[in-house]
Image: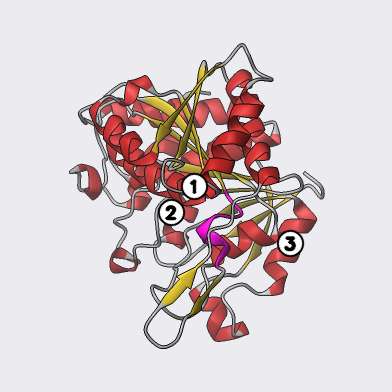
Amino acid sequence: MKTGMVTLIRGDGIGPEITDATLEVIEAAGVKINWETVEAGQEAIAEHGTPLPGAVLQSLKKNGIGLKGPLTTPVGSGFRSVNVTLRQELKLFANLRPVKSLPGVNTPFNDLDLVIVRENTEDLYSGVEHMVGEDAAESIKIITRRASERIARFAFDYAIQNGRKKVTAVHKANILKLSDGLFLESTRRVAKDYPQVEFNDVIVDNAAMQLVLNPHQFDLLVAPNLYGDILSDLCAGLIGGLGLTPGINIGEEVSLFEPVHGSAPDIAGKDLANPTAMILSAVFMLRHLGYSSAAERIEKALYGHYEEGKYLTADLGGDTGTGKMAAALAERIAKMD
């Protein structure tokens, strides 16, 4: 951390509610963080004319670390995705999405533990597109050797550091022989430098089917931007939904922690949102900052909360509000002392 401060973006929709819940849990764990709060998203448009004011990027570059609530992405028109812009402007090349079953959340797979590593800066998300006449649109898929090798090396390094035994590259090189072919060639080349880690590759449509049939065959998947985005949402569904899945964006200078899910404007302000994904994102942030003990306490409290099965939010069949769940977690953490 560069300045001793952490940039805080509360987000749109349910963002402020789950952010408040997360801050309450962090405080209960005894961690005092100097937050620098900056505004992005819908409210920033009204005040600044843009969903991503320059102060947001300046804060993240200065502090080197941030915690972010979900931001609304206009569909089909309007401003470009703030999330994509942040990742590109800050060179957050790796998107890490751990997918781990929570006790008491009944799904077809109750003991899942895998990770998706997604290249975060190029592919179709580069946003290079234009109209061809009046009746056609063209989007350009950009895959480079440098970015592909970088994300592959990140994936293998993460595997070794975290006890993962197998890396699987996801691609569509049977059809996209140049772009995805380059991604596959790059990951194969990097894999040779890590003989202690098993490596294989799978075509993306087959990967989707195999994840539904038998996700335990996978340990860590590394994928280009679009496939990684889609498959990480699929995997979130395997453990109970997006409300349970954290997200981490890693760059050479900045790290940004955020829940995978969207801003859910339909339930904003109704005290219905599940704060779990935001809390788990903060757990990874605390580990990144060196607060490993506090991170373990929060995670242990969260798993104990789910194992007990009380005070669950509506997405999991309960009737507990966001605030009450946060209070229950904070109380559980306090009792650990």
Q: Is residue 48 visible?
A: yes
Does residue 292 appear in this view? no
Which region is colored magenta? Answer: 120-127
Give percent across and percent down for residue 163: 56, 16
Residue 82 higher or lower than 221, as above or below: below
Q: Quadrant of the N terminus?
A: top right
Q: Residue at x 58, y 23 (%)?
A: 159
Badge 3 local density, few (<14 within 10 Å), some, or many (20+)?
Answer: some
1 or 3: mark nearer the eye: 3
Q: Residue shown at 65%/50% (left/top)?
A: 92
**Horizontal and vertical percent for residue 110?**
27, 24
Q: Amino acid at mark 2?
A: Ile
Q: Amino acid at mark 1?
A: Thr
Circles 2 and 1, Cβ within 8 Å, touching? The answer is yes
Mark 2 residue crowding within 10 angstroms, few (<14) / some (14–19) / many (20+):
many
Does residue 282 lie above or below 309 as drawn? Answer: below
Secondary structure state at the residue bearing disc 3: helix
The residue at which mark 2 appears reads as 18
Residue 63 belongs to magenta span = no
Q: Is residue 244 left or right of residue 171?
A: left
Which type of secondary structure does the marked residue at label 1 adopt?
helix
Q: Nearer the viewer, residue 211 or 58?
A: 211
Residue 122 on the magenta span: yes
Position of 4 compared to 245: left or right?
right
- Gap in angstroms between the C-alphas marked 1 and 3: 20 Å
Closer to viewer: mark 3 or mark 2: 3
Task: Identify the image quadrant of residue 282.
Answer: top right
Instruction: Look at mark 1 in the image and give the residue it sits on.
Output: 22
Q: Nearer the viewer, residue 14 or 133?
A: 133
